[in-house]
Image: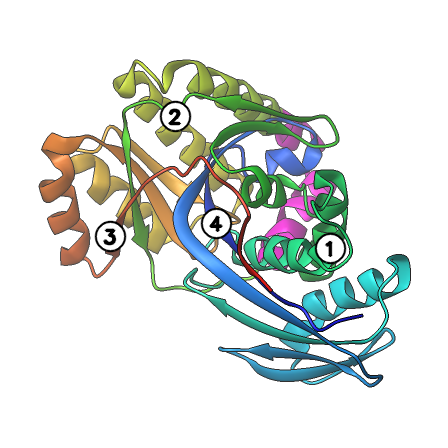
Amino acid sequence: MSKLRISCRAPAKVIISGEHSVVYGYPALVAAVNIYSRVIVETVDEFGPHEICSEKYGIGKVIGNALSGPAVLKPLARIVSVFSESEPFKGRLKIRVSSEIPPASGMGSSASISVALAYALLKTVYDKPPEERVFKLAMEGEKVAHANPSGVDVAAALRGGLILFVKDRGFERLEAGKGIFLLADSGMERSTREMVSKVASLKEREPDLFNIVMTCMGDLTVRISRVLQNDLVEAGRLMTLNHLLLSLLGVSNSRLDSIVWSSIFSGAYGAKLTGAGGGGCVLALIDEKSIDRVEAALKNINAQPRVLKTVEEGVRLEESS
């Protein structure tokens, strides 16, 4: 095999509605947004351990199914191992990973990196990597990172745009609409795995309450997907209701609640935590007229805001040589 150098990028995502309920087969409304991770894969005509170099976490070596290096690289090591075992690739891999996406923020950082890596690896053996193979390989990393991932983060990073996603049933592409999303960072990191386990524990302890909340969240998600394009007032109201349901699941906290209500009181149509909860970010639905007021209110409580744009393109090849 001749030496190859392949560079790919994949977008972050925000969940507009349906986090946690999506794990149990209910729909989620998700937008790919203009923040990216990047992966560079180089093939080497020699035997030896594969190398993963993360700009943030350092270097890991992969031999078979074993990783020598930072534990945080285990999801990527799993992708490399599965690729090496299942695809007709011979040689050694040098992988460099970087990301603009805040980790543990609810923006799908691990999925974005997993998709970019899966696409770059498969590009070494396919002229056009099959989408279903990219999805399946990226999910190998997500299963290590999050135990029971729905696949929604991977779908958003893979396809881009605004999508209505149902686990094991695929997704529907939707028109993005004219609303503006403002992302506010709580400054609190959290573990998706811990939050998913917390919700699973509630399901065991309080199955009736759990089922009521899940059904309501599923209904809200579908309703938001129908009004987001033309009724921002109703879409915002439904987003706020979704936040209250997430609070019933136990994944919000006083910091996230304060950001939600500060956003609404300063002019947002609605707001909610986005992602697994316990920390991370809040997503507010606004328009051009309210941007300055909402941004000022969020800065006043040390929740750094960022205006997000939905991007129609998912994972993309940046360089192949």
Tell me whether the residue at label 3 lies in contact with that at label 1, contact meaning CB atoms closer than 8 angstroms: no
Point 48% across, 39% down: residue:
313
Q: Name the residue under label 1.
A: 122
SS at mark 4?
strand
Give the x, y percent position of residue 291: 15, 39
> What is the distance, in whole Å, between disc 1 and disc 4 at their CAs?
18 Å
In the image, which residues are magenta? 192-211
Q: Residue 176 carries which label?
A: 2
Which amino acid type is shown beneath numbered disc 3? Pro
Q: Residues within 10 Å of mark 4 (few under 14, many from 20)?
A: many
The image quadrant of residue 168 is: top right
The image quadrant of residue 288 is: top left
Front position among marks 3 and 4: 4
Tell me whether the residue at label 2 lies in contact with that at label 4, contact meaning CB atoms closer than 8 angstroms: no
Q: What main secondary structure does the magenta stretch of the protein show?
A: helix
Q: Name the residue under label 3.
A: 305
Above or below residue 111? Residue 103 is below
Q: Mark 4 points at which residue?
A: 11
